[in-house]
Image: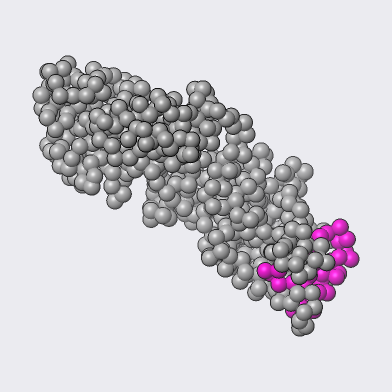
Amino acid sequence: FIRIVKALEPTFGGINLEDIKAPECFRIETALREQMNIPLMHDDQHGTAIITSAALLNALEIVGKKIEEIKLVVSGAGAAAVSCLRLYLELGVQLENVVVFDKDGVINAGRTNLADMQMRFATARPVTTMAEALDGADVFLGLSAANVLPAELLLKMADNPIVFALANPDPEINYDLAMSTRPDLLMATGRSDHPNQVNNVLGFPYIFRGALDVRATEINEAMKLAAVRALAELSKEPVPDMVNRAYGDNTLAFGRAYLIPKPLDPRLITTLSPAVAKAAMESGVARRDITDWVAYEDELRARLGVNQKLINRITSAARSNPRRVVFAEADNYKILKAAQLVRDEGIATPILLAPHARVHAIAHENNLDLEGCEIVDILQEDAKRHAFAELFYQKRQRRGMTLYEGKRLMRERNYYAAMMVETGEADACITGFTKDYGKSIVPALQVIGTAEGVPRAASMYIIQHKKGPFFFADTTVNINPTAEELVGIIGLAADTVRFFDVVPRVAAISYSNFGSNSGELPDKMRRATALAKERYPNLLIDGEMQANVALNPEILREQYGFSPLAEQGANTLIFPNVESGNIAYKVLQEIGGAEVIGPILMGMRKPVHILQLGASVREIVNMTAIAVVDAQQRNGTAL
């Protein structure tokens, strides 16, 4: 077996061993590590050890116990148990505080049927039964068989006992029985239907990723310990909304029922792999150094299937100079979750418009930490509300506005939030989560208005795809713009694409290619293209053309080589009406394998952005980052 595995090098860059029993697994792994210069790991041993070590560190932190002082009882002395014990000792567990049992009883110096690896953990204590060993014990680690731990023995353990019952498919003690016997228990199992699932998929894919990316010659103890600590720290970070949705639980947060991350957490690759790679470099087993860790994390995210470079750059820019962002609809879980995330990530300082009691109730129910977020209950802000109403009245008194109407409207959060931006009390506004776009944009247009020289606002979506970012306009604001109005939309779109540090390549979209069909829409888009070329002579634009032609430079080169877009194709699509643009982005969002960011409101005098109705937490966070960079750009500090 050893010769066969060794022969796989160098064809394979790393090898993960599975399902090799003790003691053979110890001899095999030792021999292969001595003879090979690629990463090799027996996952049954080290994967379990790494995951349980992270869970142990966090469990001890929660109950306030020191790892050097705990008493540990282990049921099972196979490969996984021995590897767990070795790593626990590295973390600080004292050997004299460990008692191990196998199928033949306690492992002590009197046993003669043990492998060298197992003899290391022979106890000198006069213990012969599990009941004796568990008396006053702090931790039980089970890697043996179902139902070997009687419930009454839990009563012998110390306060706040920790039980990792990892036998599969049934643990050493039933979860519900254990929790009802000791309500102060912290428990993990190998099952997905209970909290704190110890699943090796949390570790080995990302450990190998980090090892392979620096061409490590082995996976050493330093790399394992780095993975342990990275996994433990990740557990303390706010849980992404996509993980909450995947598990149907909005309350996931570091604590007794959440000691380690969930297997579907997308942050695992960007947390564990860099930690392992750094440890390999620092411990001298790396043959390639990584110097740009931000770029490396971007590369790891791209491996998940979506190109995140654009939004990552926007987020980094937002963090460099965070601004005050008012969330107009803060009496909603997703808005509050997003506010927590943008605060934690240093993207923005959130201002939450909602009654204090409502915000605190949602936060308590969903384990949200909103410390540092300002909460404003506009119905309690009489003086400010009246001052805003007076300003609003002065702004619109010759457009039919009365002071009474102004006071009434300032009791509505969208008007109040827009006025906060208008007066400088906030730098940007995020709204639209609970109302349709049309109702949400009116307060912004009336209070803030469009920028000088911009007759009408427009909107754009960013389509993040593996082929790169694409930009769609107008998708929500202008129902059926004229050719002349489309020229303004083209200008706004081009400026916005440049704002994201991308060179716009614009295509005017229709069902016709360069006059192949006549009709109202092709004629409009053809005229809009001609007018745009006159107004923006340096803009790369062409049309009218079909969407597939615009996005496929091969077709453009073969059929329409005269087009200035033939070299690379278009990245910015201008649609003839809101109907076509809206349909296009929603189809891509649902079945096209793309992530959609937006809508980005273009042409406003100050930053205000309106979400899709019912946007996800991720979409809210992304839009907040864009709003912050928008505010920075107006002061000359963006990107």
Examine the rendering and report whether any part of residue 34 can be seen: yes
- Secondary structure mostly seen in the magenta stretch: helix
> Residue at (17%, 29%) from the top-left corner?
101
Measuring 19% from the left and 32% from the top, which residue is drawn there?
Answer: 75
- Residue appearing at x 51%, y 40% in the figure: 270
Does residue 444 sit above or below 79 in this rendering? below
Q: In the displayed structure, would residue 338 be above or below residue 259?
A: below
Residue 234 position, x and y percent, is 45, 38
Q: Residue 96: name its quadrant.
A: top left
Please tell me in which quadrant of the rendered image residue 137 appears.
Answer: top left
State the extent of the magenta-drawn residues as a range: 520-549
Is 16 rendered above or below residue 611?
A: above
Q: Quadrant of the C terminus?
A: top right
Q: Is residue 324 inside the magenta stretch?
A: no
Q: Which of 385 and 450 is in front in this view?
A: 450
Q: Is residue 627 left or right of residue 186?
A: right
Give the x, y percent position of residue 425: 67, 47
Q: Along the horizontal axis of the image, is 603 left or right of 147? A: right
Above or below, comparing residue 234 to residue 624 in the picture: above
Which residue is outermost to the left?
128
Q: Does the magenta stretch include residue 542?
A: yes
Answer left or right for 21 relative to 449.
left
Viewer-side residue, 395 vs 312: 312
